[in-house]
Image (tube, grey):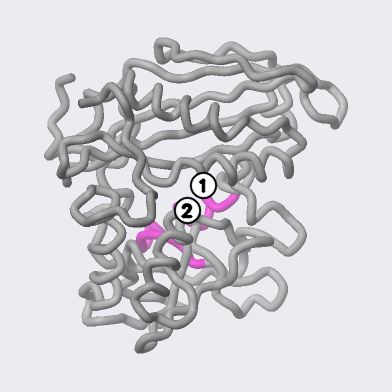
Amino acid sequence: VQIDWDELSFAFTPTRSMYVATCTADGEWEGSVQPYGDLSISPAAGCLNYGQGVFEGMKAYRSTKGRVVIFRPDQNAARCAQGAARMSMPSFPEDMFVEAVKEVVAANADYVPPTDKGSLYLRPLMLGTGPILGLAPAPSFTFLIYCSPVAAYFKGGQLTPIDLKIEEEFHRAAPGGTGGTKCIGNYSPVLVTQLAAKSDGFADVLYLDAKENKYLEEVSSCNIFVVKGKTIATPPAGGTILPGITRKSVIEIAQSRGYEGTAVVTVPVGSLTFRGEKTSFCGGEPGPVTDELYGALTDLQLEKSEDELGWVVEVPGTA
């Protein structure tokens, strides 16, 4: 694979293979690794007409031990199953999910960047692909996993503080909706505000709650967390907040290190702008809590520290 790892960004790079499985509403999943390529589905597919679909996001790393590893894939499998149930789709069994992830990574192992150069981003995706005219679940479904080598999501690197704009007019999710589900319809509605914010120089948008329009909820692409001394607070997951795997992991790490409350910090927020007034934090540099928890998490993921929790899973056949 001819890739300049130093020029890697968070942009799509096709790889060699993907995993594809199919299932009818009352049948069993059958799938295998196939060459990467386009899908052929009916114009009447449930995902195209009614947005019936969920997806996951996860990564494979080349660790300091020379192994290719994935991080807590069982948690992604569980969240995918919960989302599928919310969208009236059959769940993809956890053991098949984890095995499919391993197969895709193994088939594209040479696309996993060197240690500290990035990761292989994995996108599990479940869609209602069978044709349906009336509003109802699709008669058949497709589960697939494709992947792409990537660098940090935000420009400047993972620990470069980002500038956020607080949005008052639009909301990401509402109580009783699907904000707590990683369904495909949750994300394109935020683009109008995100693109406007980026054109003004912001990295992303921070949304307020839909009921009171005054409480912090979530960023378009990640969670938000507030640090004060040894207390770390974040909006509770469930309902309107997506229960992130990284979020859950660092909550547990933070609690084990004596922090009160719950939080995950993986990208520092350098400033918040509300009604044109900008408030900066930590002088535009990552704060000590960010450094500590980000380091603890990534050290686990890259096997720089001992994994006593069993979160890191080696992918066979990638040595």
Secondary structure mostly seen in magenta is helix
| SS category of the residue bearing label 1 | helix
Who's the residue at 30% across and 22% down the image? 108
| SS category of the residue bearing label 2 | helix
Q: Which residue type carries mark 1?
A: Gln
Residue 275 seen in render: no
Q: Quick check: 26 left or right of 297?
A: right
Q: Which residue is mark 1?
A: 75
Q: Which quadrant holds residue 51?
A: top right
Of the pair 166 and 83, the residue shown nearer to us:
83
Q: Which residue is mark 2?
A: 245
Q: Quick check: 125 left or right of 17?
A: right
Q: Quadrant of the C terminus?
A: top left
Q: Quick check: 46 left or right of 112?
A: right
Whether residue 159 appears in magenta in the rendering, the answer is no
Q: Quadrant of the N terminus?
A: top left
Of the pair 156 and 102, the residue shown nearer to us:
102
Range drawn in magenta: 189-206
In whole angstroms, how far apart are the C-alphas of marks 1 and 2? 7 Å
Marks 1 & 2, CB-CB < 8 Å contact: yes
Who's the residue at 56% across and 44% down the image? 188
Residue 218 percent across, percent down from the top left:
53, 65
Q: Looking at the image, is mark 1 or mark 2 earlier in the sequence?
A: 1
Who's the residue at 45% across and 71% down the image? 263
Q: Which quadrant holds residue 28?
A: top right
Residue 2 percent across, percent down from the top left:
15, 21
Q: Quick check: 73 left or right of 2?
A: right
Q: Residues within 10 Å of mark 1 (few under 14, many from 20)?
A: some
Q: Which residue type carries mark 2?
A: Ile
Q: Is residue 123 above or below residue 158?
A: above
Q: Is residue 36 above or below residue 95?
A: above
Q: Which quadrant holds residue 88?
A: top right
